[in-house]
Image (spheres, rainbow, N blue to C red):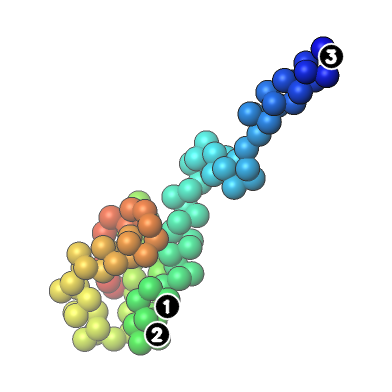
């Protein structure tokens, strides 16, 4: 009889067990860090998402209030990207799998 009781106690403890990934996600959500982490990840993946030619002409990237500011060294590229801002925002958010960017400002 005692053996079954131990087995039930073990089953209860296993029900409360979370994977490390789930625990980290919960922690990031609790401290509201997921958004900042996504922003840093997007800046690091800029070349992968936008391509090497655009990355080579990008001087600086930074976020402020979910707006991505991109400083470019090429005026024609800046004009072309300004014309397709909504597509750029959609492309970035799709690549990240979440709404990280609400607006892009090309400087």
The quarter holding residue 74 reads bottom left
- First along the sequence among labels 3 and 2: 3
Residue at the far left in the pictured view: 83
Instruction: Tell me the distance, in whole angstroms, between the alpha carbons under discs 3 and 1.
Output: 62 Å
Q: In this view, does 107 lie to the left or right of 28?
A: left
Q: Which residue is drawn at 18% across and 72% down?
A: 84
**Number of callouts:** 3
Quarter of the picture containing the C terminus is bottom left
Q: Which residue is drawn at 39% across and 85% down?
A: 52
Residue where numbered disc 3 is placed: 2
Badge 2 vs badge 1, beta-carbon distance below 8 Å:
yes
Badge 3: residue crowd in 10 Å (few <14, some 14–19, many ≥20) = few
- First along the sequence among labels 3 and 1: 3
Badge 3 vs badge 1, beta-carbon distance below 8 Å:
no
Residue where numbered disc 1 is placed: 47
**Observer-nearest residue: 45 or 79?**
45
The quarter holding residue 48 reads bottom left
Residue where numbered disc 2 is placed: 52
Provide the secondary structure element on which disc 2 rests. helix
Q: Which residue is drawn at 76% across and 23% down?
A: 7
Task: Please tell me whether mark 3 or mark 2 is closer to you in this view.
Answer: 3
Q: Residue at x 32, y 62 (%)?
A: 94
- First along the sequence among labels 2 and 1: 1
**Above or below for 47 versus 38:** below
Badge 1: residue crowd in 10 Å (few <14, some 14–19, many ≥20) = some
The quarter holding residue 104 reads bottom left
**Above or below for 17 versus 73:** above
Residue 15 placement (x, y as % from top left): 63, 29
Provide the secondary structure element on which disc 1 rests. helix
């Amino acid at each position: 009889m005692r053996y079954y009781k131990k087995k039930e106690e073990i089953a209860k403890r296993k029900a409360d067990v979370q994977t490390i990934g789930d625990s980290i996600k919960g922690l990031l959500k609790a401290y509201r860090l997921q958004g900042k982490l996504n922003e840093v990840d997007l800046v690091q993946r800029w070349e992968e998402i936008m391509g090497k030619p655009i990355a080579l002409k990008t001087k600086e990237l930074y976020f402020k209030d979910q707006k991505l500011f991109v400083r470019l060294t090429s005026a024609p590229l800046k004009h072309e990207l300004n014309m397709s801002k909504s597509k750029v925002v959609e492309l970035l958010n799709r690549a990240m799998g979440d709404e990280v960017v609400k607006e892009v400002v090309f400087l």
